[in-house]
Image (cartoon, rainbow, N blue to C red):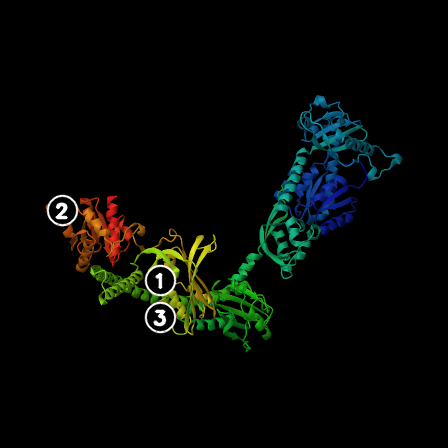
Amino acid sequence: MSSNPSSSAPPRILVNEDSEIDFHLLETEFRRARFACELRRTGTRAEFVQALEAFRPDLVISDYYLPGFNGIAALELTKRRLPPPPFIFLTHAAGEEIAVECLHQGAADYVLKKRLPRIVPVIQSVMSRYRSSAEYLRQTYMPGELLRLTHDLFSVTTRDGVMQSANPAWTSILGYSQAELVGRPVRALVHPDDAAIFDDWWRRLLRRASPPPGGDTTPAASPGRTPPDCECRFIHKHEGPRHLLWSALALPGDDKVCIYGHDLTERKQAESALRESETRFRRIADTAPVLIWMADARGQFFYFNNLWLEFTGRSLAQEIGQGCFDGLHPDDREAYIRRFHAHFVDRVAFRSEFRLRRHDGAYRWLVNHATPCIDAQGEFTGFIGSCFDVTEQHEVEDLLTHRALKQSALASFSRFALAPHSFDELVQRAAGLILDTLHVDCSCIFTLNPGDRTLILRHCACHKACARPGDFGRVTDTMLAREHAIQLSDDPENFPAAGALASLGMRSGLASPIGAPPHIHAFVVAFSREHRVFSSEAVDFIQGLANVLSTVHQRERVEAALAESEQKLLQSQKLEIAGLIASGVAHDFNNLLTAIRGYGELLKDNLPPDATGDVPVSLDGLLKTTSRATALVRRLLAFSRNQVLTTETIDLNTLVTDLRDLIASFLPPGIRIELKLHPQPVTLVADRNQIEQVLINLAINARDAMPDGGTLTVSTTIRELAPGEIPALRAGSYAGLSVQDTGTGMTDEVKAKIFDPFFTTKAPGRGTGLGLSICLNVIRHFHGDLLLETALGQGTTFQALLPRDPVAAEPAGNFDTDTEAYDSSMVPLPSSGDDTAKDSADESGELIYLVEDDDDIREVTTAILRSLGYRVRAFAAAAEVLAHITGKKNTETPSLLISDIFMPDMDGRKLSQHIGKIHPSLRILFMSGYVDSPAQLNDTYFIAKPFTRDTLARKVRLALDARRE
C-alpha cells in the first residue's frame, strides 16, 4: 500500500464510475456495512489520472465499461504507481472471458453490481492480502529480485540520496553500469537545469517521512505519505537527456528511500510530435478553402477554423460548445440537432445538409462531411467535419425545377411557330403565353418604327382591361445595344413604355429584344403591378419566346429577300442575254461601219480639193453619222463587257460643254441646267466615251430626283487631296466632275444601298438599278472614286474624282483597253492631203498580206492600203494565205500581216503561230469588232473596228517601223 500498512487511518478508495447513481449505491452499501473509508469518484481519463496523483488511493474500484475510457485502461494507469494499489472491477455483467482477462491484467478481484453487498468483504480480503504481500516483498524480494521485475528504474537509496542498489533498467535507460551507480548520489545524474526541482521534491519527501512534532497523526502528516511525483531530466551516459517521472517511498525505521522512475522520453517525444502535428493541422485547417469543425465524444464543439469564423462573423468563444447551432436556419435547427447527436451514438461517418446564417445575414446551404476520430487506444474521441457552400447548386436545382414548368410551354410555342403561321398570329399567342406562364398583369409586343425609333403597340394581353396609352416614347441607343432581357422599372430612361404604363399601375417588368443589335425591330414585354424582380428562369423563358419570334421574323425576311433575289436573278439573266445579243450585234455592226466609213473616206479622198456642192457635204454627214454609230457601238460593248477602251487626254470643261445640249434635250421644261466650269483646263487620262456615259447617267438620275422641277448643276474642279483625306484615294491632284440637283434627297437607308446593283427607287419598268453601279465601277476603274452628299428635302450631289496623273489613271480591273503604246505626236498620220504614208510605201515597196473573211471589209481595207501606197495581197481565209506562203512558186516576203481575229476556219491567233514558224520576224496587226482581252495578243498590234483611214495608216506605219527596229 502507498500508506503505512499498520496505520489505523481509513483507507482512501478511488472509484472510477461514470454513473452517479451507481456511486451513491456504493456509498450506501459502505454505510450499511459500517465500512469507514475516504471516497473520491472520477468519470473520465483525465479525472482519473489527476486523482491517482493527488489522492494517492490505497484501493481502486472501477467500472469495466465507461464512455471513451474503459476499466482495462484505468488498470494500466494504476499499475504504473509505486507500489501499485490493489484494483477491483465493479461491473453490471462480466462473463468468464472478461473475468479471466481482468485477473490476467493484474486486477485483484471483481464484483458484480447486482451483488453489491459482497463489495465490503472483497475489499477487506484484498487489502489484507496486499498488506501481507507488501511486507513479504519488503523483507524478502526488495533487496534483489523485486528490482529485476520491472522495466522501470528502481533503486534503494539512503536518506541522503546515495544509491545502495539499482535494477538493470538503469543501465538500459541511462547507460550506466551497476558499478557506476552504486554509491553515487542520485542528484549527480540530474540535469543541471532540473536540479532545483529534484532537490525541492526530495526535501518534501524526507519531511513527510519524518514523524511530525507533537505526535500529529492526521493522514496528511502521517509518515510514509509521499509528495506528488517529480518529473525531471536525467543525464544519459552517451546520449541526450531522458525525461523521467519519479515516485518515492521513504521507509520509516529503515532510514531508506525507495525510488521508482518511469521513462517518459518517448511519451514526451510523442507529445511534442503531437503538438507539432496539431499545430500543422491547425495551420492547414485555417488556410483550407472549406469550413472545418471538431467536436468531442460528448458532442461538444471545441474547434472551428478561420474560414468558419469568417463565414459566420462570430468568435471561437461564441461557436464552441453548442453555440454554432445558433446560426442554423429556424426551419432546420431542431431536426438537425437531433440528427447530429444521434451520430455520436452510431460513431460512423455521416453526411448532412443544412442552412447556416452568413455574416451578412443571408442563409447559405452547406453540405457537411464528418469522420469519427479514434485515438491510439482505439477509443472514439469525437468527430471532425468539413463543410462546403452548395448554395449555387441548390439554386441551379431550383432553377431547373422552375424551368421545367416553363419548358413545355416554350416547346409548345416552338412547335406552333414551325407551322406556317404569320408573325401576327405568333405575336398574339406569345403575349397570352407570357401572361399565363409568368403570372404577370400585362403582356405586350412592341414594334420599332425604323424612322424615329418610337415604340408601336402591336398586341397587348391583360387579365384586367386596361387603357391603351398612345405614346410609348422613343427607344434609346443604350436599349438598342442590349442583347438580353432587362428588368424594368417605371423610369422612362430604363424603357420608355414602362414609364407610359406606370400611370396604369405597372411598377415592374421584363423586356427582351426581338432580333440582335443592330437589327432589333421589336420588344416582348411583361408588366406587373407589384415591385417584382423576375427570376432567371423567367428571363430565360421570355428570351426564348423572343428568340422564336426573331427566328420567324427572320424567316419571313429571308423568304422575301429570296423572292426578291429570284426576281433580280431573272432580271440579271435577261440582261446577260441582252448583253450577249448586244455583243453580237455590235460585232456585226462594227463590220458594217468599217466598210461604210472606209468607202466614205475613199470617196472624200478622190474629190478634187476645190469640190463644192452637195457631195462634199453629204460625205461629211456620212462620216459624222458613222462616228456617232461607232460611239453607240462602244456603249453596247461596254454594256456587254466586250468594249475596247481607248484612253486619251480629256478636258472635262470641253466634255461638259460638248454634252450640254444633249443633257438639256432630255430635261423637262421645269428643270434648268447650269454649268460651273473651272477657269483652267481640267485634264485627265481616261476613255472619253466612258466618262461621257458617267455624266449622262448622273444627269438622268438628277432629273428623276426633281419631279417638280429644279436646277441641275454640272461643275468641274481641280482638287488636291492630302494623305488620308479620302481613305479610298491616294494623295495627289484630282479632276472633279460634279452633278448636283435640288430634288428630294435620300434617307440614310437609301444612301446605304444606292450603289448596290439592281437597287432602284424608281417605279417598276423605269430603271434596272445598274446606272449608278456602272458609274462607280467606271470611276474606280480609272483609280478614282464617286462621292455622295445628300439630305432629305435639300437635294443630292455626286462628285467623281479622277487622278490627273496619267500613270495613276491607267485603267485597272477587268475593262478592256487599247493595246496602243505610243505617242501619237511622234507618228505622222497620212490623210487625203498628206502623202507621207504613200511615199514611204513607194520607197520601201512594203508588201502587206491582208486576211479578212468579210468581203466588204476586205475590199475597202485593200483600197485604203493601196491608196496609202502599199502593195496588198488579200485573202478571204487563213487557209488561203498559208497555202500561198508555203507554195513552191511563192518567192514573196511580206513586210506585214493584217488579220481579222475571229474567222470561220482558223482564228487570227493560230494563224499568227503558223506564219511565225515560217517568217519569225514578220509583224502582225490584228483587227476585230470585239475582243475579250487584247492583252492576250502579247507583243502584237491591234486595231478596233470600225477604224478610220488615219488610224489604219498610223497602226500600219507603227508596225512596219517596229519591224525595222
Q: Secondary structure at mark 1?
A: helix
- The part of the image, by quadrant, that contains residue 391 is bottom right
Q: Position of residue 730 (x, y in %)?
A: 44, 52
On the picture, is 385 further left or further right than 882?
A: right
342 shown above or below 554: above
Residue at 67 percent across and 37 percent down: it is 272
Q: Amino acid at mark 2?
A: Thr
Camera-side residue of 315 and 603: 603
Q: Is residue 225 at all visible to an observer of this figure?
A: yes
Task: Count the labels in the image.
Answer: 3
Tell me the quadrant of the picture where the C terminus can be found: top left
Q: Position of residue 170 (x, y in %)?
A: 69, 27
Camera-side residue of 219 and 299: 299
Tell me the quadrant of the picture where the N terminus can be found: top right
Camera-side residue of 700 and 457: 700
Q: Position of residue 615 (x, y in %)?
A: 22, 66
Which mark is first along the chain, 3 or 2? 3
Camera-side residue of 786 and 313: 786
668 shown above or below 913: below
60 shown above or below 810: above
Mark 3, residues whose alpha carbon is within 10 Å: few (<14), some, or many (≥20)?
few
**Residue with the mark numbered 3:** 665
- The part of the image, by quadrant, that contains residue 714 is bottom left
**Residue with the mark numbered 1:** 692
Residue 281 tag number: none
Q: CA distance from mark 3 to mark 1?
A: 15 Å
